Image (cartoon, helix red, strand yellow):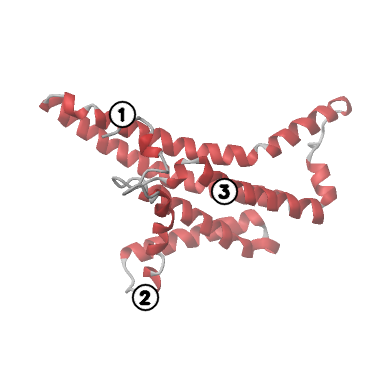
Amino acid sequence: MMTNLFSSFDPSSGIMSLPLNWMSTVLGFLFVPYIFWAMPSRWTLTWTTLTTTLHKEFKVLLGPQHSSGSILFVSLFSLIVFNNSLGLLPYVFTSTSHLAMTLSLALPLWVSFMIFGWINHTQHMFAHLVPLGTPGPLMPFMVLIEMISNVIRPGTLAVRLAANMIAGHLLLTLLGNTGPSLGVSLLSILVFSQILLLLLETAVAVIQSYVFAVLSTLYASEVN
């Protein structure tokens, strides 16, 4: 029985006092080798089509000189969408609902982009701090605003993903806890609404993975 509303998001809970929840992060990798040894199926063809489409889109965003780097962001999308989808299963911990996981993805990417940009394209990075056509008196303020918006990028990436995962799961948990106190007629409405919310959460899991990968790709394209 849940003693705390947020205990379903507690990464330290587990079986026999063992913190096994973080193991859900690597469960998605169990589906990857299946594509290489099993016969082609509809799932395999669908996933191949999806990743190929993302690969082409990310190549356009990165430009022809750095198009090979799109495989990194396709892999990032795959990792996040696997973890988001596994979190929809009962009693499976959603690792992407914690800032410890999302910051571990966003912060190293952002730091590597900044180091690469300031070392190899220093003038471009300085020019990016002042938008084209900015009046002279406003330039110091625009530099400050651009620096702040650049620094908070990994935080916004991490918080956006974690907040969207927590919000949907928390709503499902709240509605599920009201089930025992409802009558038969209201219970059927509750089950129907839970199914609709589950479908919505499935769409959110894919969309948030796509948003995270696309924004990371855009941040990488800005330093080139």
Image quadrant for the N terminus? top left
Q: Residues within 10 Å of mark 1 (few under 14, many from 20)?
A: few
Where residue 11 appears, as percent x and y from the top left, is 42, 43
Query: In this rendering, which labeled residue sits more in front, label 1 or label 2?
Result: 1
**Is residue 48 visible from the viewing direction of this image?**
yes
Q: Quadrant of residue 73?
A: bottom right
Image quadrant for the C terminus? bottom right
Q: Residue at x 59, y 60 (%)?
A: 70
Q: Mark 1: which secondary structure?
A: helix
Query: Marks 1 and 2: CB-CB under 8 Å?
Result: no
Q: Which residue is outermost to the left?
A: 184
In the foreground, 223 or 7: 7
Q: Which residue is outermost to the right?
A: 136
Q: Residues within 10 Å of mark 3 (few under 14, many from 20)?
A: few
Q: Residues within 10 Å of mark 2 (few under 14, many from 20)?
A: few
Left or right: where 184 falls relative to 101: left
Q: Earlier in the sequence, mark 1 or mark 2?
A: 2
Where residue 126 appears, as percent x and y from the top left, is 83, 43
Q: Mark 2: which secondary structure?
A: helix
Where residue 223 appears, as percent x and y from the top left, is 73, 51
Q: Quadrant of residue 142?
A: top right
The mark found on residue 174 in the picture is 1
The mark found on residue 104 in the picture is 3
The mark found on residue 37 in the picture is 2
Left or right: where 27 falls relative to 222: left
**Is residue 221 visible from the viewing direction of this image?**
no
Q: Separation of disc 1 and disc 2 at Cα?
A: 42 Å
Looking at the rendered structure, the kind of residue marked 1 is: Leu
Looking at the rendered structure, the kind of residue marked 2 is: Trp
Looking at the rendered structure, the kind of residue marked 3 is: Ser
Q: Earlier in the sequence, mark 3 or mark 1?
A: 3
